Amino acid sequence: MNEAPWPAPAKINLFLHVTGRREDGYHLLQTLFQFLSRCDEIAIRLREDRRLVRIGGLAEVPPEEDLVIRAARLLAETTGVRRGAEIELTKLIPHGGGLGGGSSDAATVLVALNELWETGLDTNELAELGLRLGADVPVFVHGYAAWAEGVGERLEAVEPVEPWYLVVTPPVAVSTAEVFAAPELTRNTPPATISDFLSGSCGNDCEAVVCARYPEVGEALEWLRGRGAARMTGTGSSLFLPFATLAEASRVQVELPARWLSFIARGMNRSPLLDRLQRERDRRR
C-alpha cells in the first residue's frame, strides 16, 4: 500500500438540535462537530485497470454498498479518471454509534484519491460531492471543527475546547432513519447561538427518542451522568463524557461495566487527515 494509512477520524456532536423539516423530508439541524483522535485507517494502492476493490471493512456491509467504494466511484465518474484503487479499511470506530465512521471513511477516500489520482478538485468541490454521500461528509472533507446548520452542509469553523473524552458505546446499533422518523422527535427547537452553547443551554434532541427505544443507551447515559456532564452524540448509541486530563478519564473508564465498549480520545479541532494530506504533497514534490 502507498506509504502510511490515511486517517478517518471519529466525530462527536457537542449538541444537536432539530429546528425544522423541509418539504422534501430532510430535517433542519444545528450542531457543533468536533473530531476525535480515534480514527479508522485507510490504506490505498493505485490500480491501472479502473477496478475499485475494498479490503477489510465491515463484513455485514457488501463492498458495493460501502461508502468507501461509493466515494471512490463518485469521484471517478465525476472526473473521468481512468485508474482504479485497492482500498484497505481498518475499522476502529464503533459502527452505528453516531461517531460518523462511515462518513469519515468516505471523506478520507475522496481527499486521498483526489490527491493520488491527481484529479484536481478543490476542497469545496470535494465537499459538494461528499454531500451526495451523506450530510456529515463535508465537515470531514473540510477538516475543521464546525458549527453546522441546514441539513449539516452550512459550516462555520469554530474552536471549542479540546478535552479528553471517555466514549462509551452500548452493544446496540441505532438506526438514524428510525430516530428521524419517530413521531415523538422534537422538530421545532428554537435556533441557538454559539453563546447559548457556551452557556450550557444546548442539548441533543435525539436523546429522549433513542433512550426510550434503546433502554441500554439510557442506562449507560444515566451511569455516566452520575459522574459528569455526559451526552449522546448524533443519533447514538455512543455517549461521551469530557475530562480535563487523561488520568481523570482513565479513572472513570476502569469503573465501567464490562458489557459496554469504551475508549478514550482527545477532542481535536483540526482533523489529522489534513496533516496526512500535507505529508503526501510534500512527499510527491
Image (cartoon, rainbow, N blue to C red):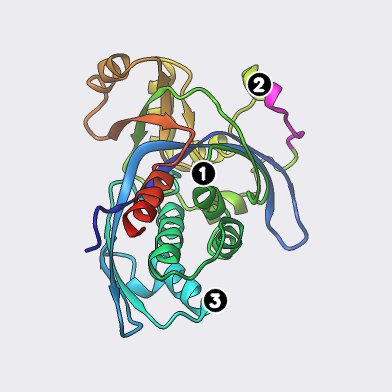
Give the mark nearer the N terminus: 3 vs 1. Answer: 3
Q: Which one is in front in this view, the residue at disc 3 or the one at disc 2?
A: 3
| Nearest to the observer: residue 264 or residue 128 | 128
Q: What's the CA distance linking mark 3 and mark 1?
A: 31 Å
Which element type, helix, strand or loop, lies under badge 1?
A: loop
Quadrant of the rendered structure where residue 127 is?
Answer: bottom right
Start and end of the magenta stretch?
189-195
Mark identifier at residue 98: none
Picture coordinates of residue 244, whole percent (x, y): 40, 15
Q: Quadrant of the C terminus?
A: bottom left
Mark identifier at residue 78: 3
Picture coordinates of residue 109, whole percent (x, y): 40, 61
Q: Which residue is mark 1?
A: 235
**Hey, what amino acid is under mark 2?**
Ser
Query: Does the magenta portion include 194?
Result: yes
| Nearest to the observer: residue 11 or residue 190 | 11
Mark identifier at residue 201: 2
Q: Which one is in front in this view, the residue at disc 3 or the one at disc 1?
A: 3
**Residue at image x 46%, y 57%?**
107
| Residue 69 makes an appearance in the image | yes
Picture coordinates of residue 188, whole percent (x, y): 75, 40
Horizontal side of residue 28 vs 71, given as left or right = right
CB under 8 Å between discs 2 and 1: no
Horizontal side of residue 272 vs 29, given as left or right = left
Q: What's the CA distance linking mark 3 and mark 2?
A: 43 Å
Quadrant of the rendered structure where residue 271 is?
Answer: top left
| Nearest to the observer: residue 173 or residue 242 | 242
Give the mark nearer the N terminus: 3 vs 2. Answer: 3
Q: What's the CA distance linking mark 2 and mark 1?
A: 19 Å
Query: Does the magenta portion include 128?
Result: no
**Hey, what amino acid is under mark 3?**
Thr
**Hey, what amino acid is under mark 1?**
Thr
